[in-house]
Amino acid sequence: MRTSQTHNQGAIATPHIPPPLVVAGLTAAGLGVDHLLGTTAPSHPRRRVASCVIGTGGGAFIASAVLAMVRTGNSPNPRSPVRLLNKHGIYRISRNPIYLGMLCAQVAIGVARGSFATLGLTPVTVAILQSKVIGVEESYLEEAFGDEYREYRAHVARWFGIRRRSVEGDHSSR
């Protein structure tokens, strides 16, 4: 198993609103606003294709993150304690691939439906996730894994990006 130290402290403090509900709620709000105002764009084949690509990419982020969690013995349930800091797989390019996948879903729905409000609310979704969810999770991980997490955070983008340099302890080329 290519992971770091085991950590068995208590579960992470969870936000009051589960992240999927934040994304779903703001997506629905955007669709509702556009419906009420009649501001959706007409359907177009290119938008449908773009939506499918974005949505499939988001689904791939989520699926690979869940797979990486299961492989390391961690639970995808955010209320469960993190046993091992996962720095492999999709976690080499994103510290938050599940949230990134959820945001892709919001954008894909906005594009497919021609919903300008849904697309416009995506930055609000990002802001809420960063301030109300990710901050809590990062504090927990820093307390649980200390310098190892700080090193990982310094070299892996929050949302998506190429690693700036090798994460300490990761000698694999995979």
Image (tube, rainbow, N blue to C red):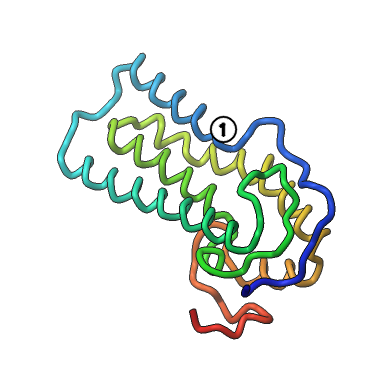
In the displayed structure, would residue 163 be above or below residue 131? Answer: below
Relative to residue 76, is residue 121 drawn left or right?
left
Q: Which residue, given by chain and number where applicable, does mark 1 sit on?
A: 22
Residue 96 image offset from top left, x and y in percent: 57, 54
The quarter of the displayed image where residue 79 is located: top right
Crowding around mark 1 (Cα neighbors within 10 Å: few <14, some 14 to 19, many 20+) is some
Disc 1 residue type (three-letter): Val
- As helix, strand or loop, the secondary structure at mark 1 comes to helix
Residue 152 image offset from top left, x and y in percent: 67, 70
Residue 107 image offset from top left, x and y in percent: 39, 41
Give the camera-side residue of 48 and 63: 63
At horizontal 68% and vertical 80% (from top left) the residue drawn is 168
The quarter of the displayed image where residue 47 is located: top left
Relative to residue 164, is residue 133 drawn left or right?
right
Give the camera-side residue of 111 and 49: 49
In the displayed structure, would residue 82 be above or below residue 45? Answer: below
In the displayed structure, would residue 95 be above or below residue 37? Answer: below
At horizontal 51% and vertical 27% (from top left) the residue drawn is 25
Give the camera-side residue of 31 and 89: 89
Give the camera-side residue of 103 and 77: 77
Which residue is farthest top? 36
